[in-house]
Image (spheres, rainbow, N blue to C red):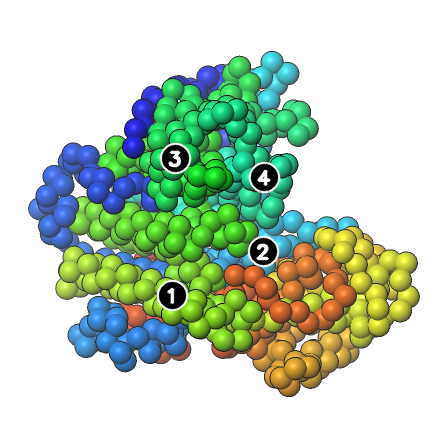
Amino acid sequence: MQHKQKAIKSRKSDWSQVSRRQFLQGALLSSTGLGLGMALHGCTENGQSQAIAESGQAPQGQIDGRRVVILGFDGMDPRIVSDMMEQGELPHMKSMLDQGGQFQNLASSNPPQSPTAWSSFATCQSPMNHGIFDILRRNASNYLPGLGFGSMSPPELSPLGHVTRPPTYENFREGVNFWKVASDQGLRVKSLLVPYAYPPDELNESSRMLCGLDVPDIRGTQSTYFYFSDALETEERVSGGIRMPLSFDGDQAQITVPGIANPNLRNSFATVDLDMSVDRDAGQLRLTFQEQAVTLHAGEWSDWMQWTFSLTNQYDVHALSRFYLISAGDEVALYMTCLQMHPQEPMIPISEPESYSDSLVQRYNYFKTIGWAYDTKALQQGDMNNEMFIEDAWQSMAWKERLLLDELSEGGFDLLMAGWTVSDRVSHMFWPYRDSRHPFYTPELNAQYGRVIEDCYQRLDETVGKVLERLRDDDLLMVMSDHGFHSYHTEFSVNTWLIRHGYLAVKDQDDPETAATEDRYLMGFDWSRSKAYGLGLGMIYLNLEGREGQGIVSASEKGQLMAEIREGLLAERDPETGEPIFSEIYTYENPEGASVEHAPDLLLGYHPGYQTHKASAAGSAPQEVYAPNEDQWGGEHAASDVALTPGILFSNQPLQENAAIIDLGVTSLRYLEVDAPVEYEGKSLLV
């Protein structure tokens, strides 16, 4: 493999001398590409030699005192953990119990969605106060939904191309993160890739933070991959990706890659030309762009490649991506990751201090910066195969482990947190191979992929073991997950059910037995005849007078209507098996909290095996209430009954039982002798 890297140019904007933090004040929200053999470069940031960092010993002169270490494994399921411990497959987690620690279920947020649960972890509050209930939230005045947890605002440019306001990201979450509380009290914090904690908090000068899940790509999406092939005839936009056709003249082809959108010109993007040269006999492809070149053989990942997109003559945006050559014989098929923010020149800061992400490049070379770190959409679309996905996942885990262990060995912290989302992603994508009721299941695929989740857990258990080796006697270690997991073999259309039972009406359709609409985002409904509607993965709203823009349900009707809908849903049974669809339906007639305006009136609690139909979640109503889940995304938790979907909590010291995710931050602060804010709802678990 050949790879010529080009030095990053200085940003050409007229605001380059101004701290980007000044532009972010008041905004609440808007890797694995390294070869595993890539060594660290020289010393760790505080000058300790790499040999010391790898030894597991704290540097001499480190301030003694209590420390808290939290490892967060998104979606790790307590049932699988218990079964694996019984089989001796998680020896390091088990050793925490043998040495006087504890293992218990951890109550999640309601709903047990990742954005909701990690927001509860961070703020020690329920969704009624932090305001994150689902992947979508609706505007009550016009019913139009938007992202539920945050969004990016593009840069504003003058007519001459100067940046008048740089891009920002706004986090919709309310509340103060508990590590921010610790930092404000003078404690030293290291926050490494904790999910849904973006943009970075402003911490004291002894602290550092690298953001993970929720960091967007340069296009402002959670992740938009690219797939190039000469088997394609036209460009196609698919969920999570862009498919682009290649046209070879002999062995040469050129494709124009769109980067960041121009906010002043509709449907206009800054672009870079990517040149390709194929040797079909050898099964290899050479890629050349912006003074870089790499030659790939089929089945091979590239190193990280750098991109510079000139949005105007005054403003460049820098990015990273990797390539994977799927085939280069009769058909050329090339996968490219999303265009990730460059850690040395991120268009929006991804770390605190801003220089921290740059310093990590000095240590490790380039690394994955996208928050949605595992390309589930490409796998769902068939533009990535299982082996590609798994290889990328294991490489990503190895890099994250190295970062954690280096920071742990370096010391210089009172509170250290590190998050992994890989356990969630492999559970979503490989659960179908362990559930014989899922349409994707076959005995052959079960034999090949039925234990990928267990393989992931074992790798994380090895990380736990390495962390345990580096702890001091008075360190408190908590290993947690935000929720558990279930199979997802059948889809249930909430909006279709509401139509069939007379609660929701479709425009220009009068028969509730046949009415349906493909219009997304609640655009197909007649609000003058609708009493309730579903949105997102597990929410139902009433069409209330005075709240919704065209509400028809009076306040006096609210309680009875909620009770009717709840009773009807709980009585619903799978027509093929007789199983209940819901284990519980949670109602909020008079909710209390700082963010109740975003709260649903009813919250679905699905029985294992069932989830909301994807079309219904997006605000449509398909013809059938039930449908098989013909998608590899076959494990789920997002709208499952929270009572059946706890996470895990291991600790190396005894803690109180009946722990909840909102308790962990309060427990950490109390262990470090810091008072928790009065608005925190969690309790200390210390005994």
Residue 254 rendering spot, x and y as whole percentages: 51, 25
Give me the C-alpha separation between circle 4 and circle 1.
30 Å
In the rendered structure, which disc, 4 or 2, sits on the residue that comes first in sequence? 2
Quadrant (top left, top right, bottom left, bottom right) of the N terminus: top left
Q: Secondary structure at mark 3?
A: loop
Which dot, 3 or 4, sits closer to the camera? Answer: 3
Name the kind of residue labelled 2 in the image.
Ile
Count of picture labels: 4
Most foreground residue, 426 or 137: 426
Q: Amino acid at mark 4?
A: Leu
Q: Which residue is mark 3?
A: 281
Mark 1 neighbour density, 10 Å: few (under 14) some (14–19) many (20 or more): few
Q: Is residue 17 left or right of residue 612?
A: left
Residue plotted at (58% across, 56% down): 135
Q: Which mark is residue 232?
A: 4
Where disc 2 sits, the SS reads: loop
Question: Could you tell which of marks 3 and 4 lies nearer the N-terminus?
Answer: 4
* Image height of 30 relative to 179, above or below: above
Mark 4 to mark 2: distance in Å?
32 Å
Q: Is residue 397 visible?
A: yes
- Residue most extreme to the bottom: 578
Residue type at the position of mark 3? Asp
Rendering quarter of residue 469:
bottom left
Q: Which residue is mark 2?
A: 135
